[in-house]
């Protein structure tokens, strides 16, 4: 008899391989994934009723662990909601439901770690003590529970972004396995291109992501276009010159034949000057990118967003020096600590 078997802790390929070794028919294994991913049902009783597992394997499908939903916090910004979960070891994980432009459609912002060692000076998550990676099932269960709440309200989840607590590429294997599971072609799965994985710029992992031919979208958060400012804002990531990060982005763009998504946290009086725009233009060069501008949200009050005039001036400078698509991303949920950089404050 195998030990407890949690499909949420494996990629679909790993799960199906183990199923074959245990002589579980492929059709039954796929039905189990459909039950988990499509319907979000994690109990042994569901497996028994569906006739998916033979008696000898039912013990391996003992009720799977779930995150405990501690609190739902709706925002005054329509559609935004923060979910506060507790893990079995009583650590806090925060997840955000994000409304999309199409009415009734939502994305789920999931966390990949508790805390973060990258030390971004404007991020609440970096202040959480004793950081650790989330297990695969802890990542997947955030999505499944958030989707269940959206469905209960009559909406639908059409995407996922790994932009919550933590640096996803530091928990690479579990994040990729979770993303593969969520996009596995079973009932109600989401497409791989509807999943975005964010990073502050870990070059070896970006190159690995590119070499593996991952279909998920990649978003690189720069923070600044010069090493001097990047060291101030993102200390751990700044150990790698920003030019090397952009070189990895270029390799990814060439391999995928698509634009690379760059996120840029805008901080008033810090990184939104004419010279910052000029430096960004020099850094990017002719690498095809799409730049998303995001207002900083710093719980300490040390950093503040640029005012309207400062931001407009920066965008005008970007048009001159960058000459590529620039958009301002609305970071909703600031009133509930759900905007970019604010998770972990509950």
Image (cartoon, rainbow, N blue to C red):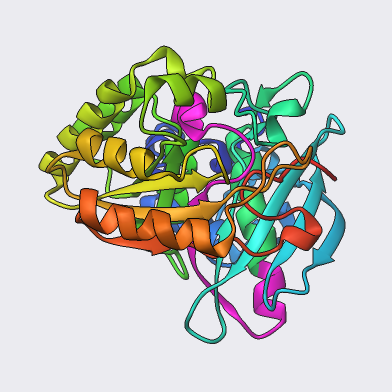
Residue 290 occupies quadrant? bottom left
Name the residue nearer the viewer: 102 or 27. 102
Quadrant the C terminus occupies? top right
Spot occupied by residue 4 in the image (x, y as percentages of width and height): 66, 33
Residue 303 occupies quadrant? top right
Span colored in magenta: 148-174
Spot occupied by residue 96 in the image (x, y as percentages of width and height): 67, 58
Name the residue nearer the viewer: 214 or 282. 282
Q: Is residue 171 magenta?
A: yes
Spot occupied by residue 37 in the image (x, y as percentages of width and height): 53, 59
Residue 108 occupies quadrant? bottom right
Left or right of 246 in this view: 94: right
Q: Visible in this render: residue 27?
A: no
Quadrant the N terminus occupies? top right
Q: Visible in this render: residue 12?
A: yes
Spot occupied by residue 224 in the image (x, y as percentages of width and height): 43, 34
Q: Is residue 220 magenta?
A: no
- In this view, which residue lies farthest toward the top? 239
Name the residue nearer the viewer: 34 or 332. 332
From the viewer's perspective, is residue 45 above or below residue 228? below
From the viewer's perspective, is residue 63 above or below residue 338? above
From the viewer's perspective, is residue 15 above or below residue 25? above
Q: Which residue is painted at 45% across and 64% down in the image?
A: 189
Q: Which residue is painted at 53% across and 65% down in the image?
A: 38
Total marks in image: 0
Q: Which residue is painted at 42% across and 38% down in the image?
A: 176
């Amino acid at each position: 008899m195998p030990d407890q078997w949690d499909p949420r802790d494996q990629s679909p390929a790993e799960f199906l391989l183990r199923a074959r070794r245990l002589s579980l028919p492929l059709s039954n294994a796929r039905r189990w994934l459909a039950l988990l991913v499509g319907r979000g049902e994690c109990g042994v009783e569901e497996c028994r009723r569906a006739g998916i597992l033979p008696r000898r394997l039912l013990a391996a499908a003992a009720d799977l662990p779930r995150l405990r939903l501690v609190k739902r916090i709706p925002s005054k910004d329509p559609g935004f909601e923060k979910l506060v979960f507790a893990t079995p070891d009583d650590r806090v994980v925060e997840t955000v439901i994000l409304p999309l432009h199409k009415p009734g459609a939502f994305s789920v912002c999931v966390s990949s770690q508790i805390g973060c060692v990258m030390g971004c000076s404007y991020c609440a998550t970096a202040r959480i003590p004793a950081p650790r990676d989330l297990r695969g099932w802890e990542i997947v269960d955030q999505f499944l529970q958030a989707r269940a709440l959206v469905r209960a309200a009559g909406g639908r989840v059409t995407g996922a972004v790994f932009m919550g607590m933590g640096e996803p590429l530091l928990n690479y294997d579990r994040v990729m396995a979770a993303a593969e599971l969520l996009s596995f072609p079973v009932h109600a799965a989401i497409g791989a291109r509807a999943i975005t994985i964010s990073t502050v710029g870990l070059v070896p992992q970006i190159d690995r992501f590119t070499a593996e031919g991952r279909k998920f979208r990649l978003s690189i958060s720069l923070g600044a276009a010069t090493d001097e400012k990047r060291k101030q804002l993102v200390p751990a990531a700044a150990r790698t010159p920003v030019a090397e990060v952009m070189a990895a982005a270029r390799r990814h763009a060439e391999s995928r034949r698509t634009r690379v998504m760059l996120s840029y946290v805008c901080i008033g009086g810090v990184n939104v000057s004419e010279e910052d725009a000029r430096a960004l233009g020099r850094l990017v060069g002719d690498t095809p990118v799409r730049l998303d501008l995001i207002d900083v949200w710093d719980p300490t009050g040390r950093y503040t967003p640029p005012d309207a005039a400062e931001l407009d001036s920066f965008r005008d400078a970007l048009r001159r020096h960058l000459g590529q698509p620039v958009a301002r991303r609305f970071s909703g949920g600031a009133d509930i600590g759900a905007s970019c950089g604010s998770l972990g404050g509950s």
